[in-house]
Image (cartoon, rainbow, N blue to C red):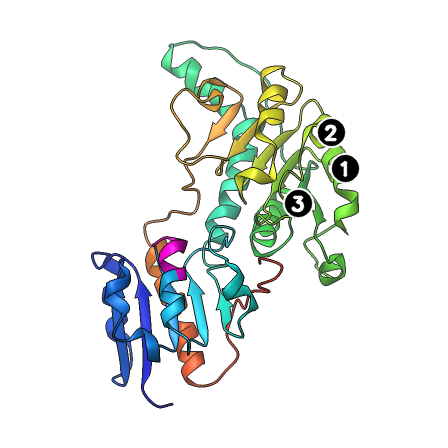
Amino acid sequence: MDDITILALSSPAEPQLKMLSALPDHANLAVGERVEAFKNLAPRADVILHWNTSRALLEEVWKMASKVRWVHSRAAGLDTLLFPELISSPAILTNGRGVFSRSLGEFAVAAALFFAKDLRRMTRNQAEGRWEQFDVEELHGRTMGIIGYGDIGRAIAERARPFGMKILAMRRRPELSKDDPLVDEVVGQERTMDVMSESDYVVSALPLTPDTRGLIGGKEIAAMKPNAVIMNLGRGPVIVESELIRALEERRIRGAALDVFDCEPLPAGHPFYRLDNVLLSPHSADHTSDWLDNAMQFFLDNLDRFLKSQPLMNVVEKRLGY
């Protein structure tokens, strides 16, 4: 391949940019978080790396970069990134899907154990110097319902299965997982209510699209077992937050473990902060010490494939949003 030009939409202070020193000698690179940083190289750019800036900047740079053939997003979720011109263009879009799945899978199991063993009660009693024996539950034999059985969903199943849990999965195209040895049953979206009613632990791992926004609302939450726990590791607005809060306050379900929210950061005084049946993560369930290094390495690995004219990993169906 001849010279390649890459535009990295990022604060120049990001430590992971040092990893771009591995770029081939024939690569031209522009880095910045203002449109002025890209005016010289944008007209001949081949690749845009959207690292940590706004969609507005990407849209402005896109207008100048008519030759771009590939856009990569560090994030897995694309609901705040996509815009009509990018969707309709022939440019390939890839994302960080899978880079962070392992840690999210561990969080789901940790949250299930948090409720099964009533760890909040244990830590509260320890802090109060109280010796109070009580019964705990096993995960063995319980059903983990995974709504959105993609890469994150499968990472959850891989970690829940060794505990002896039954895996009930829902995905838009269930035929893609019909032979998956981790799954006891895979169903389509029309059976969301069955997943909600049959599961002891329900995990939403869905991206945010017009089809998934508000997918889990009052009716779906009402179908849950009284002792069931719901988790959200995908995008906040997939679950109707007001309905979830009401169910938690009224103790109609056992609890919730949440990593994503309608509004982030979660504002002061939000009900989730005071509810003792909520395990709250500030959208950091996948923030391992090396998560950003891994994200940049994934881009570099994909760039190597791009330079060799090989198929890219994590190609997004832009019109579907994932």
Which quarter of the image is occupied by the C terminus? bottom right
Seen in the picture, residue 272 relative to 288 is either above or below; the reply is above
Is residue 165 in sight in this rendering?
Answer: no
Q: Which mark is residue 266?
A: none
Q: Position of residue 193 (x, y in %)?
A: 77, 37
Q: Quadrant of residue 44?
A: bottom left
Q: Amino acid at mark 2?
A: Lys
Residue visible at 49% across and 52% down? 102
Q: CB of mark 3 within 8 Å of CB of mark 2?
A: no
Residues marked 3 and 1 touching at CB (< 8 Å) = no
The answer to if 48 sits in the magenta stretch is no
* Residue under the image location 53 percent in, 32 percent down: 257
Task: Find residue 219 and name its label.
Answer: 2
Work out whether 83 lies above or below 46: above
Q: Which residues are magenta?
A: 53-59
Figure quadrant of residue 126: top left
Label 2 crowd bin: few (<14), some (14–19), many (20+), radius 10 Å: few
Give the alpha-carbon distance from disc 3 to disc 2, as whole Å. Answer: 16 Å
Cβ atoms at labels 1 and 2 below 8 Å apart? yes
- Eyeballing the image, is 38 above or below 174? below
Q: Position of residue 258 (x, y in %)?
A: 51, 34
On the image, numbered disc 1 is attached to which residue?
A: 193
**Disc 3 residue type?**
Ile
Q: Pointer 3: what residue? A: 147
Q: Position of residue 198 (x, y in %)?
A: 76, 35
Q: Earlier in the sequence, mark 3 or mark 2?
A: 3
